[in-house]
Image (tube, rainbow, N blue to C red):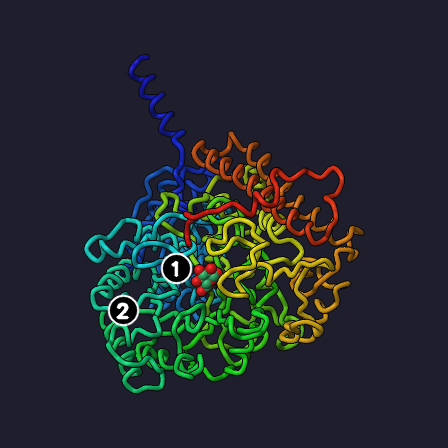
Amino acid sequence: MKPLLLFLFFMQAIALKAEDGYRLWLRYDKIDDAALLQQYRSQIGSVSFENTSPTLSIAKKELLTGLEGLLNKKITGGKSINNRIVVLLKPKESGGKTTADYNPLGKEGFSILTIDKTKNIIVITANTDIGCLYGVFHFLRLLQTHQSIQNLNITSVPKIQNRILNHWDNLNRHVERGYAGLSIFNWHELPGYIDQRYIDYARANASIGINGTVLTNVNANALVLTKDYLQKVKALADVFRPYGLKVYLTARFSAPIEMGGLKTADPLNDSVRLWWKAKADEIYALIPDFGGFLVKANSEGQPGPQNYGRTHADGANMLADAVVPHGGIVMWRAFVYSNETPEDRFKQAYNEFKPLDGKFRKNVLLQVKNGPIDFQPREPFSPLFGAMPQTPLMMEYQITQEYFGQGTHLVYEAPLFKEVLDADTYASGKGSTVAKVIDGSLQNYSITGMAGVANIGNERNWTNHPFGQANWYAFGRLAWNHDLSSAQIADEWIRQTFGNEAKLVSTIKNMMLASREAVVNYMTPLGLAHIMGTGHHYGPAPWVSNAGRADWNPVYYHRADSFGIGFNRTATGSNALAQYAPEVQKQWNDSNTCDEKFLLWFHHVSWQHKMNSGRNLWNELCAKYQQGVDTVRWMQQQWSSLKNFVDEERFKQVQMFLTVQEKDAEWWRDACLLYFGTFSKMPLPINYEKPGHTLDYYKSLKFPFAPGN
Ligand code: BDP
């Protein structure tokens, strides 16, 4: 081969080089639509930044890198007269420079406006530098998703103030329920070594508006509050600050005993209160914009105020008092239940917290999981969302896929997030959606928040499954604007992450939108929940009845017997339904009219029960499990059709994961139906795929090294 040919061959090989996924949705590859590229090139000539700050330097670098990549041309930093993008903070004297209305933008919102159509001048503007950075990311997203940039008139303000990732990361880098490798936070090497990944992590979060991160596990280690560790926290806070990302820590309630040498951690004890105040002062001296504390107390063995006969409000308020002089907040988790209480676990958080409504300090948010039990593939919304008008409630979602196929299943979670946000609590009449509760518009909260348990680790592509990135992305976008639809968010994410070809976008979008229901069907259809393996929660184990506590046993949840299956939570059962508004109760309290998605959440239903399809319950259950498997097979076909649209590395990765997912879906189907069949005593429908193994085989499977446990 001639040298030139060899060179070209080599260059092409580089161009086809597989993607390892590290760049997430911020790839900025050259726009591959020639006409559009031409148009954008003619519209964008230079970029000028009217102000300076560390955040604005980041914004400038981002804008230049993004534009140069997307347009494949040099962008000047100067002030050309035409075709200019101007990034500016609210001018001190408006001087007629923009027509932006700054009042509604608040601390984080931005406007993107075409201020001169003939000269083609676009202004990205905000009250703050972080608002400008968000605006820059939004503008780049327009180009990445091939939107028009003519006559722009965009205003965007986050609906939720605190948009926070919760890392369940331990100080030894093991991530509880983490399926993407070790924790990205390398505490041993901090504060001396700043991994580039910290910067890239902050940048990715800023690009979707996430503005807070809780660095440590809710099952907390008090060590992080020691002087040495706080230096490490400070190092991270310094890296994250210009990206608008505040750090938070989990506070172990017994820290005054473990770290401070006190005899008690009683929240009403003066020495304890002083200890926390001093600790807060120490933290804020290092990190003036420290966000505050997240606390799991008196839950699953964690210490808390109840150890001293005090209430959750006493505990939360003590910490709130410690951080309030510095502007900090406390996120107190409502995920509490007790084995000793002879009460349906579904009801316990409500029973505990409802009486405390209005008893928390103003800087406390009560962090409530989306459902009453624990991040199952489908849960009704937590009744607390409709029950605490005087307490700011924040949402807790689980982005990491603990109950969702963990690191290997393709599941797009936005439909789950949206289902909960759109649910109507009827707290103040019709239209009192969970979204309006948590964004504060229903009850006039002064602080609002949304948390997502992170799925990020040190795997090269951050989330192990390439589609795990979509869930991180969707969480951020929804926390910013919960009016976005699952389809819109998927569309944006696909275009930025894979490309803009119509077939590629529509095929992947259809897969994503079908994926959550597929998992519900092959794991826990018709309102089943919590029937996975003990401890690691990987795979089906509906037969388990010997877990450490009653409410950790699958048999506690599904209650299958010779009559039927499901948990009676009506007035004749645990009456958990009474925790909802009457209108909500009405939707669910009759097994003949209850939405079948939630049927077994609320009813113990006969195997012969007639379903909407005309089938009896047993046959419907079989059909749902099969439907779940079929959808995975359909996803496999869909993905195969994209061979020429996706780089080889990610194509193969997803293909292999889908094969795992198909096998797992079959495993779930077969194990669950064989087991439930021992109660229904009914055969699998004719022509039904025969289980691959016996029930005893499925029961014998062990996973001693399942990750995240
Ligand atoms: C459960 C997880 C456990 C967490 C707990 C929590 O299995 O690892 O510690 O939630 O949220 O889902 O506190």
Nearest the viewer among 120 and 495 is 495
Q: Residues within 10 Å of mark 1 (few under 14, many from 20)?
A: many
Question: In the rendering, at what x and y percent does residue 374 appear?
Answer: 52, 62
Label ID, residue 326: none
Question: In the rendering, at what x and y percent does residue 47 appear?
Answer: 34, 50
Question: Which three-letter amino acid code belongs to the residue tagged 1?
Answer: Trp
The secondary element bearing badge 2 is classed as helix
Residue at left offset 29%, top offset 16%? 3
Q: Quadrant of the N terminus?
A: top left
Name the outermost residue toward the top: 1
Question: Which three-letter amino acid code belongs to the residue tagged 2?
Answer: Leu
Mark 1–mark 2 distance (CA, rounded to whole Å): 16 Å
Q: Which residue is mark 2?
A: 225
Q: Which residue is mark 1?
A: 168
The secondary element bearing badge 1 is classed as loop
Q: Is residue 67 visible?
A: no
